[in-house]
């Protein structure tokens, strides 16, 4: 718990989990635009496939780069992934016209978004935990990380609802999902944009101290492991 790298990763994870919790509103947003259930499900599938592919791709890229830049490659990959959430959220929620005529544009954007914003856990968080935490404590550390991120991330969905209703004027009583709603789709898209771009930007910023902290913590963990082996 005293390892600074662990503290930083947990902090960025708490903030970084907010956009992923907000994603649950995508289906509702698609239906407000006017997409039917099948089209909405297909769009969500493109995003899910992109995320699955991106998790693998991010891990591979970070593994390769870390051979040449062991102190910074994983942090750079994580920051790249967090950064990509900003332009893709902007394009998805504001640039593409909110019309059923642009299903293909949504599908391509969601796939590319998924494949680029899903790197952090596999390219940085999990591998870095493994390097700075003694093996006997890894299970506990991973559990703490999941608990912190999950508990705070659960606040994102209510936050999206509050922002959408209180700031952007979404009126649930005036909306019929079966027929769509231009005003409702617009309000929800702005609420989603707020709860995605801001956390992605903060997540990008919170990774920065790891450029100096990670190297020191990894070396401390290595020395501690050597001492433990000598004692045994």
Image: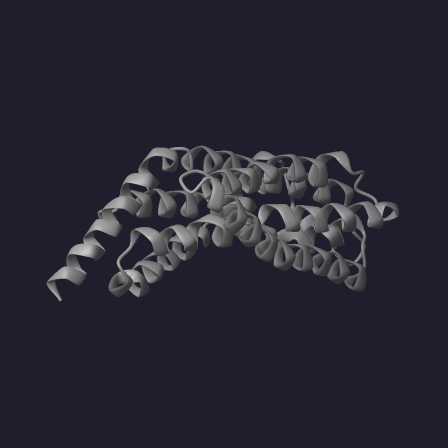
Relative to residue 62, is residue 182 drawn left or right? Answer: right
Q: From the viewer's perspective, is residue 167 above or below residue 50?
A: above
Q: How is the image coloured?
A: one colour
> Which is more toward the observer, 105 or 7?
7
Q: Where is residue 187 in the image (x, y as percent from the top left)?
A: 67, 39
* Front-lying residue, 51 or 56: 56
Question: In this image, 106 relative to 232: left or right?
Answer: right
Residue 102 visible in the picture: yes
Q: Which residue lies furthest to the right in this view?
A: 101
Percent x, y of residue 49? 68, 59
The tally of labels here is 0
Q: Residue at x 81, y 45 (%)?
A: 105
Of all residues shown, which one is farthest toward the left?
231
Q: Nearer the viewer, residue 78 or 132?
A: 132
Residue at 20% x, 56% y: name it.
Answer: 226
Q: Nearer the viewer, residue 186 or 125?
A: 125
Can the viewer see residue 1 in this picture? no
Residue 26 in picture, x, y percent from top left: 66, 52
* Left or right side of 218 for 90: right
- The percent position of residue 102, horizontal first and vertical second, equals 85, 45
Give the position of the C terminus as an image quadrant.
bottom left
Q: Is residue 159 above or below residue 46?
A: above
């Amino acid at each position: 718990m005293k390892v600074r790298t662990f503290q930083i990763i947990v902090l960025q994870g708490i903030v970084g989990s907010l956009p992923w919790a907000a994603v649950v509103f995508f289906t509702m947003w698609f239906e407000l635009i006017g997409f039917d259930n099948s089209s909405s499900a297909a769009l969500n599938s493109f995003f899910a496939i992109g995320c699955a592919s991106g998790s693998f791709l991010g891990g591979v890229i970070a593994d390769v780069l870390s051979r040449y830049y062991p102190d910074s490659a994983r942090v750079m990959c994580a920051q790249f992934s967090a950064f990509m959430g900003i332009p893709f959220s902007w394009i998805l929620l504001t640039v593409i016209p909110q019309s059923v005529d642009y299903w293909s544009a949504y599908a391509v954007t969601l796939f590319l978004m998924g494949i680029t914003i899903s790197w952090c856990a596999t390219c940085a968080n999990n591998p870095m935990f493994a390097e700075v935490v003694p093996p006997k404590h890894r299970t506990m550390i991973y559990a703490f990380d999941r608990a912190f991120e999950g508990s705070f991330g659960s606040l994102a969905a209510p936050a999206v609802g509050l922002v959408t209703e209180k700031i952007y004027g979404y009126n649930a009583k005036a909306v019929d999902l079966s027929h769509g709603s231009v005003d409702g789709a617009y309000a929800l898209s702005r609420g989603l944009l707020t709860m995605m771009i801001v956390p992605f930007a903060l997540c990008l910023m919170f990774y920065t101290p790891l450029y100096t902290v990670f190297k020191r913590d990894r070396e401390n963990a290595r020395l501690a492991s050597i001492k433990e082996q000598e004692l045994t």
